[in-house]
Image: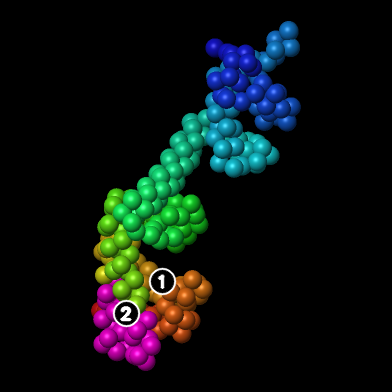
Amino acid sequence: MEWTIQQVARRAGVTSRTLRHYDDIGLLPPSRVGSNGYRYYDVDAVARLQRVLLLRDLGLSLPVIAEVLDREADEETALREHIRLLEAERERLDRRIGAVRRTLDARRSGQDPTMDMMLEGFNDSYEDEVVARWGERAFRLSNDWWHGKDMRQQLAWKRDTDELVDAWAAAWRDGTSPLSDRAQALAARHVAWLGAIPGTPVADGDRERSAAMVRCLGDMYVTDPNFATTYGSVEGAAFVRDALHEYVRVTMTAP
């Protein structure tokens, strides 16, 4: 089975000129060229075009697309990767749709939506960071959990989170020692907060990985400038880190 360049262009939503350009640069040669000079495309060529269009829509340049396709081991592997990329794109779109809907709900109820609420799903660096630190499963479970909440539930969670942050900041302003009962109670509350998020080692009950995660978060609160602002200052973030590290030492790793 094969199709003319005009048929392929029409069904793919591109121009014949685009397909000729793809041929000229070696990205998508036709399966054959007729004696009349017309280009014809078989099933394999159209399947390759499908992958070209997907990668183009994901923002890859034509030279990069050519490199990706040249590295593909076989068509079945390529199609599985195609599906994975489409599912990831669908998840991103679902997050954006959810953000817009929550913004609309907030406006209708007379509330001012937060910036995080409005821009959720428009910055993929969060996903990349979670996957890099804790794995794809952690991101998927926590993301599904968060987007399964309605606006009222999300606002309630954010309110609880803000109260925890405020309690940390108040303890630091009061000159509390990170080793004190007050600081350790906050650390326990912080770990319980993490445990409420599906996909985290704390939620999974993995003692060793939970301790590593809490220590890592404590360090990140100091090294990431965003958290220094969250906890009032670098010193405030260091107080949280020290309290969490002590909690891990005494409670999470003690024999």
Q: Earlier in the sequence, mark 1 or mark 2?
A: 2
Which corner quadrant of the image does residue 27 belong to?
top right
From the viewer's perspective, tell me whether residue 18 is left or right of residue 254: right
Say which residue appears at 34% left-offset and 59% top-offset: 111
Kindly identify which residue carries mark 1: 217
Which corner quadrant of the image does residue 61 belong to?
top right
Magenta stretch: give its range: 167-191
Numbered disc in front, either 1 or 2: 2
Say which residue appears at 27% left-offset and 76% top-offset: 188
Kindly identify which residue carries mark 2: 167
Which corner quadrant of the image does residue 120 belong to?
bottom left
Instruction: Let me know if residue 208 appears in the view.
Output: no
From the viewer's perspective, tell me whether residue 49 is left or right of residue 87: right
Q: Nearer the viewer, residue 56 or 114?
A: 114
**Other-residue count near label 1 (Cα within 10 Å), few / some / many at <14 / 14–19 / ≥20:** some
- Distance from Cα at disc 1 to Cα at disc 2: 17 Å
In the displayed image of the protein, which residue is found farthest to the top? 35
The kind of residue tagged 1 is Leu
On the image, the x and y values in percent for residue 244 come to: 35, 79
Residue 36 vertical placement versus 163 (above, below): above
On the image, the x and y values in percent for residue 235 come to: 46, 85
On the image, the x and y values in percent for residue 174 come to: 35, 90
Say which residue appears at 61% left-offset and 21% top-offset: 9
